[in-house]
Image: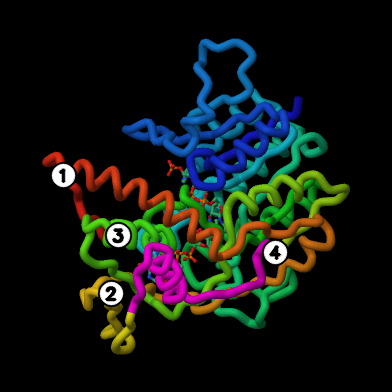
Amino acid sequence: MKKAIITGITGQDGSYLAELLLSKGYEVHGIKRRASLFNTDRIDHLYQDPHEKNRNFFLHHGDMTDSTNLIRIIQQVQPDEIYNLAAQSHVAVSFESPEYTSDTDALGTLRILEGIRLLGLEKKTKFYQASTSELFGKVQETPQTEKTPFYPRSPYAVAKMYAYWITVNYREAYGLYACNGILFNHESPLRGETFVTRKITRAISRIKLGTQNCLYLGNLDAKRDWGHAKDYVEMQWLMLQQDEPDDFVIATGVQYSVRDFVNVAANELGIEIQWKGTGVEEKGYDAKTGKQIVAVDPAYFRPTEVETLLGDPSKAKQTLGWVPKITFDELISEMVAADLEFAKRDLLCKKNGFEVIERHE
Ligand code: NDP
Ligand code: GDR
């Protein structure tokens, strides 16, 4: 039985990857940081009671900022594969907490790689690094490939650039099987509520049921290449099953704007949006009721923005035989359906006298 460690197991990708590895017969060890609440909603369906015999799913307390703890877990598990998904992953938040983001996302990656080396596991343990299309930042060519130069535009992206290169360096210096997956945005019903896609599907569902009045957004013109997280974790696994380690762009090759995303999500619920005004004055109205349901709030603008990203996944298609299966429309449909269920639950609470907070983050 192969053993894998997943850092960031409580996150969106951690959950889908754990499911995938368990379905392939792996023993999965997730690293979870201590929180004042359980914070295991995304992996509760995989939970196994510590008293059970023959378990294949384990959680360890750990933190990317704590080397000794990471090394101890690697030593104890002796993994065949490590998937380093843990990160302060929110670009806007990285402008508010740049030092913490660097410690976790950049040095955290080094700590794991050093752990593998110090424990003499260079020939046993394969390493996957969650690299990102944010590395391309202010894009130098379109579409972006593995050869496109990097131009990071946030503390998050700069930290991830260190992580990218330290992964390449340990591969070249110590012969580690270490890979970077340069993943473009990928979403799902498990996406964090403050990333733009989930913020939109959640808000539109609540607006439909009357538990929210307005969706406040930042840059409506930002363009992204959005895929489904379930598709993308399969590639993370595939990258560690090859003869030689390498780096791959993972994307759909199709691009939409934030405004497009809002339109498709609203259409899913039978809402047609009429857009009026430009820039910070742009507003979206429900064509049927005339009610304003979308507004621009400059608080969501970033000090330096990544305006456009579009990936070319040809290398992954050729080498890994990987193709994304879930389309943009199917992704949004699944996200809206899931958020509509949450909105129905909120409505029920509201009707029974419980407070339902309209959060804007
Ligand atoms: P999430 O934000 O959903 O999950 C991040 C995970 O990292 C959570 O489990 C979080 O724990 C954990 N984490 C954060 N800080 C620490 C820390 N100091 N120590 C230990 N664990 C920590 O991200 P995704 O699942 O969406 O993304 C996975 C990885 O892929 C990230 O590295 C991200 O930067 C990268 N990526 C994501 C893309 C995307 O579109 N989703 C695209 C390209 C790259 P907690 O639950 O406690 O917060
Ligand atoms: P991103 O994702 O920054 O690409 O990083 P996010 O969904 O946060 O933003 C995408 C684009 O939408 C614009 N935008 C808004 N974004 C948020 N969060 N909230 C808003 O209200 C809003 N309005 C407009 C943003 O300015 C941006 O242009 C994600 C993360 O998962 C990273 O960890 C990962 O590396 C990259 O994707 C690839």
Q: Residues within 10 Å of mark 1 (few under 14, many from 20)?
A: few
* Residue at image mark 3: 361
- Label 4 element class: strand
Could you tell me which residue is drawn at 78 percent across and 39 percent down? 122
What residue appears at the point 28 percent right and 69 percent down from the top-left corner? 216
Identified by mark 3, the residue type is: Glu
Q: Nearer the viewer, residue 345 or 79?
A: 345
Report the quarter where the C terminus lies: bottom left
Q: Nearer the viewer, mark 2 or mark 3?
A: 2
Residues at badges 3 and 4 in contact (C-beta under 8 Å)? no
Residue picked out by circle 1: 351
Residue extending farthest left: 353
Mark 1 or 3: in front is 1
- What separation in Å lies between label 1 and label 2 (alpha carbons)? 24 Å
Residue appearing at x 60%, y 66% in the figure: 133
Give the foreground label among 2 and 4.
Answer: 2
Give whichever of discs 2 and 4 has the lower sequence position: 4
